[in-house]
Amino acid sequence: MEKSYILVLLLLVFQDTMFSLYAASPNETDIEALLSFKHLITNNTSFLSKNWTTNTSFCSWFGITCSPQNKRVMSLNLPNMNLEGKISPSIANFSFLTMLNLSNNIFSGNIPTEIGNLSQLVELDLSHNQLSGSIPPSFFSISSLRAVYLVNNSLSGSFLVDEVKGLLNLEVIDLSYNRIIGEIPSRLPLQNHIGGEIPQDLGNLSKLKMLGFDFNNLTGEIPESIFNISSLEYIAFTDNDLSGRIPTSLGLQLPNLKGIFLADNQLEGEIPMYITNAAKLIELELAYNFFTGTVPSNLGNLRQLEFLNLGGNQLTNEPGQRQLGFLNSLVDCRMLQFLILANNPLNGFLPDSISNLSSTIEMFNIENGQING
Ligand SMILES: *[C@@H]1O[C@H](CO)[C@@H](O)[C@H](O)[C@H]1NC(C)=O
Ligand SMILES: *[C@@H]1O[C@H](CO)[C@@H](O)[C@H](O)[C@H]1NC(C)=O
Ligand SMILES: *[C@@H]1O[C@H](CO)[C@@H](O)[C@H](O)[C@H]1NC(C)=O
Ligand SMILES: *[C@@H]1O[C@H](CO)[C@@H](O)[C@H](O)[C@H]1NC(C)=O
Ligand SMILES: *[C@@H]1O[C@H](CO)[C@@H](O)[C@H](O)[C@H]1NC(C)=O
Ligand SMILES: *[C@@H]1O[C@H](CO)[C@@H](O)[C@H](O)[C@H]1NC(C)=O
Ligand SMILES: *[C@@H]1O[C@H](CO)[C@@H](O)[C@H](O)[C@H]1NC(C)=O
Ligand SMILES: *[C@@H]1O[C@H](CO)[C@@H](O)[C@H](O)[C@H]1NC(C)=O
Ligand SMILES: *[C@@H]1O[C@H](CO)[C@@H](O)[C@H](O)[C@H]1NC(C)=O
Ligand SMILES: *[C@@H]1O[C@H](CO)[C@@H](O)[C@H](O)[C@H]1NC(C)=O
Ligand SMILES: *[C@@H]1O[C@H](CO)[C@@H](O)[C@H](O)[C@H]1NC(C)=O
Ligand SMILES: *[C@@H]1O[C@H](CO)[C@@H](O)[C@H](O)[C@H]1NC(C)=O
């Protein structure tokens, strides 16, 4: 009686073990890919070798999340670990990877071409490493990509908008603090498309929210098509070598725009009045360019505006007026915190309304503005 009870118990235990072994049955391809990945890491190896041991399922390894359905590697999340070395081409074998975050480590060398094999990838963050070379063209075939952060590496080579336009689900691309060169293809040659056929070009990125290229070496003009992506919230091209004018459609097609960062370029021409059509604008940063003409007198329409920097340009007051009238309009920006107009030949008097500027103002800088009285 007791014996058969124990036997049943043993059978149950055995069955249970069999079942859990089966359920956790590791995919050899994933293990091999992870071990190859680890093999190319040369710093903080002691942490990984203690944790990434083959006597436990890789699904319980530090930084790894497996898909509950097929127990395949779904995300590889190893930021801030001082990992040093190369990114292994073996990542190609993580066929179900949706998230790769290796940000803030010391990875160097190229981004492997094999990254293009990650056909399910949704988010990629390789920011704050020492990656060099150009972004492999294969990368631009991952149509599932929604967010790409490659901030603060040493990536170089030219950036071709043509490549990016295949990434139809893209919401964020941030390549700030690299050495990307090249000319963003300028205005579409409308005159060559008789019959009204206009290539959609960048406008195809209809989900794009963030286009980040601060601190690179881009030249040429900002293509008008960028300003035609109505989902855009942030356009950031601070400190490049961009020239030409702000495209004329700016503000017309950008109902969601919250930030424009174009400081430290060689942009010229006037600041278009209809910039204020971008009603959700919070930050407008156009300092240190060659903008001319008057400071728009309707900036007060930007009710959400918190940060306005037009310093270091050639902006003037309304001709024939003695008061700096545009300041009257800015009184309507009740959220304004930073107002910088320094180093412009403004040449005028401060109006009395200056005392009615937002109580949230933290900085008001108008030095070298040829202010009288
Ligand atoms: C492991 O993954 C590879 C590649 O996706 C696949 O070919 C193979 O059948 C998988 N093996 C198991 C045991 O699931
Ligand atoms: C890893 O790199 C960091 C930063 O360079 C360094 O401080 C640390 O000592 C290195 N760790 C090992 C185990 O080599
Ligand atoms: C797994 O193996 C490592 C050494 O390879 C050992 O330190 C660790 O205790 C083992 N863990 C388990 C759960 O057996
Ligand atoms: C590895 O790290 C994970 C997450 O911190 C932890 O749950 C797991 O127990 C660790 N495994 C080993 C063998 O140390
Ligand atoms: C190694 O990584 C672990 C896990 O993030 C971290 O706690 C540890 O500080 C890292 N060691 C070094 C030397 O960076
Ligand atoms: C992918 O896995 C297969 C089978 O394990 C292996 O032969 C191949 O070398 C791996 N590919 C890469 C790029 O590591
Ligand atoms: C990657 O990890 C860092 C550090 O935890 C985090 O700040 C960042 O948002 C993560 N990236 C993505 C795309 O989630
Ligand atoms: C990666 O993609 C290339 C081109 O599509 C293909 O030839 C190769 O077999 C793929 N490698 C893996 C490991 O899936
Ligand atoms: C870029 O990363 C380095 C470390 O690799 C760090 O010291 C530096 O502050 C970062 N720069 C920016 C702008 O984030
Ligand atoms: C852009 O969109 C148009 C119209 O929806 C489509 O015909 C074209 O193929 C798309 N281009 C790309 C590169 O996806
Ligand atoms: C990129 O720009 C930086 C600063 O703006 C400059 O020092 C550097 O020489 C430029 N590099 C190239 C390749 O143009
Ligand atoms: C902007 O988008 C509209 C509507 O989709 C389109 O008709 C127009 O040609 C586009 N303009 C540019 C410059 O891409």
Image (tube, helix red, strand yellow):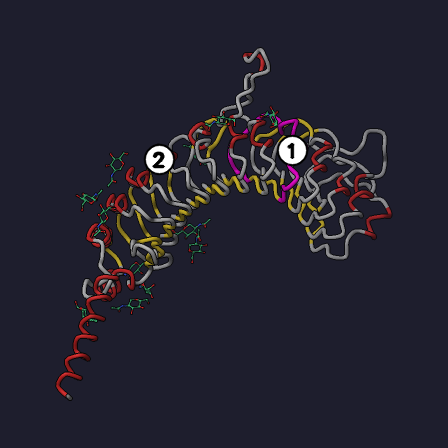
Q: Nearer the viewer, residue 182 or 312?
A: 182
| Image location (x, y in percent) of residue 30 | 24, 52
Which residue position holds label 2?
134
Badge 1 residue CB within 8 Å of ligand 12: yes
Circle nearer the N terminus (2, 1): 2
The extreme left residue here reads 3
Name which residue type carries label 2. Answer: Ser
In the picture provided, is 135 more to the left or to the right than 219? left
**Residues shaded magenta:** 236-258
Q: Secondary structure at mark 2?
A: loop
| Image location (x, y in percent) of residue 240 | 51, 35
Q: Residue at x 63, y 41 (%)?
A: 257
What's the mark number on residue 253? 1
| Image location (x, y in percent) of residue 175 | 45, 41
Q: Residue at x 83, y 52 (%)?
A: 356
Q: Which quarter of the rendering shows the N terminus?
A: bottom left
